Amino acid sequence: MKLQAPKGTRDILPSEIYRWHKARKGFHDVCHSFGYEEISIPTFEDTNLFQRGVGDTTDVVQKEMYTFEDKGGRSITLRPEGTAGVVRSYIENGMSSMPSPIRMFYDITAFRYENVQKGRYREFHQFGLEAFGSEGPAIDVEIISIVNVYFKKMGLSHIALHINSIGCPKCRAAYNEILKDHFRPHMDTMCEDCKNRFERNPLRMIDCKVDAEKDIVKNAPRLIDHLCDECKAHFEGVKAGLEAIGIEYTIDPNIVRGLDYYTRTVFEFVSENVGTQGTICGGGRYDGLVESVGGPHVPGIGFAMGVERFLMEVEAQEVPVEKPDYVKIYFASMSDDAKKFIGKTCYDLRLNGVGCEQDLMGRAFRAQMKYAGKAGIPYMAVIGDDELASGKIKIKKMEDGSEVEVETADLVTYCINNL
RNA sequence: GUGGGAUUAGUUCAGUUGGUUAGAGCGCCAGUUUGUGGCACUGGAAGUCAUGGGUUCGAAUCCCAUAUCCCACCCCA
């Protein structure tokens, strides 16, 4: 049997990894500029954490988790997302007694057992962040603006922001009753999924794809019209904050979010370029989560961005991403003495951070030239007995063929300063 | 979990109604006299035709199963 990468996983090859490097560095930089610091959390956690944190009733927990028993008999789960682990760490490390807000970003892989399609993998990458301890709308505006700044800095344009408020447990409970009253007389006309949703999570019936065209769904009362006074004021604050810094948004009453922990503000950045999922980045507030995982009552908010989807968008918008020249110069050798000299020179250059290459294949001189050309190395120098005798070496710029002559003794210094 | 399409060299793909030794472009390796790259020319390596069964004198080709990939449903990043 041929060995291959498991379903839903993929290699990121050297030919494309620089795109990831750029995306990562960009995200880290933007987060840092907002005062967020990186946290690294375990790839796997106690299964209970996700059951409590993500929510027992969610699809993610019910059918998509990679769960196994380890040799000590513990139930372990590969993280299906980042928030639960960060919240666990927040509690475990007593961060609630550190100066608020606590703001951290992460850069992780996550795992969900799902069927693969465009923009969806079983192992996938997420950039995300969490902010704890701040209740007011300002922090909502801040994290949305982080995404906005990041997209701009990475050269993207026109990614639509959709926002909504799904209220707090209080107004949501009241609204659920209103919603059930609305649907109850018409349940026999609804799809099977919706019949299940009716008791479990009536909110989801609103964005049901199957029943979307039915008047009963279209005319359903909207949560956003039934927020309590506090939630309404909070949402107004978010909108005003976004407007104040000029971030465009549309209110989408149908954003519900698939994870149980969200409260109040929820948002998505959506695009047509990332498959039918559409969501590049999704997030929101989760004021009850820390408490439900066993910590103090601390409000929180965060988002996660699908890196594969983000990069799809970068490609779709044809944002140019240049591959860096890690190797600056290639030394072609004409003799054994030259090889020795080149070996020492390369060592010295690398000690000083200058990337360089020499022949490792025993190639003929002409073939070395060919290799350097195809590898796209920007500079090269030919070294043979003549150069060693004369003490002068010509460094050639491949792009235009121009040459500079350098004393052998100055070669390393010249490369450090000029390449 | 459910549907549709696909799978032949590293890669992109041909491959006739089932018929000898399965081909091409690109890429890779070497060479075109040990002094200057991308181009050109010459040569070379490279395939269990996804896997396992079946039909047949004979299967890359027809049938069944499985795996994987792509797309969609569900749901999500």
Image (tube, rainbow, N blue to C red):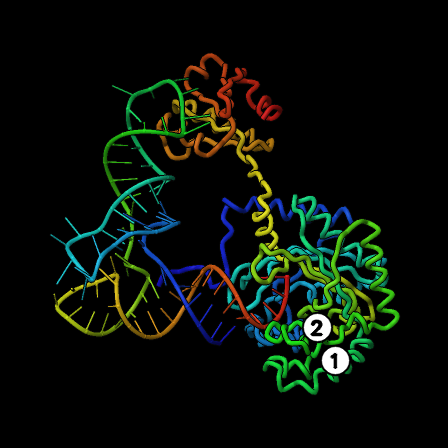
* Residue drawn at point x = 81 percent, y = 71 percent: A225
* Residue drawn at point x = 55 percent, y = 34 percent: A325
Rendered position, B49 above or below A197 = above
- Chain at numbered mark 1: A
x and y, in percent, of residue A118 in the image: 53, 60
- Which residue type does callout 2 highlight? Asp
Is residue A199 shown to the viewer in this render? yes
Single out the residue that lies furthest toward the top: A390
Secondary element type, mark 2: loop
* Residue drawn at point x = 69 percent, y = 84 percent: A199
- Residue under pointer 2: A260
x and y, in percent, of residue B58 in the image: 16, 64
- Chain at numbered mark 2: A
- Which residue type does callout 1 highlight? Leu
Secondary element type, mark 1: helix
Of labels 2 and 1, earlier in sequence is: 1
- Residue under pointer 1: A179
Q: Which mark is residue A191?
A: none
* Residue drawn at point x = 65 percent, y = 46 percent: A156
Rendered position, A2 above or below B30 = below
Camera-side residue of A398 and A93: A398
Crowding at label 1, few (<14), some or many (≥20) Cα neighbours within 10 Å? Answer: many
Q: Quadrant of residue B3?
A: bottom left
Rendered position, A70 above or below A384 = below
x and y, in percent, of residue A297 in the image: 83, 71
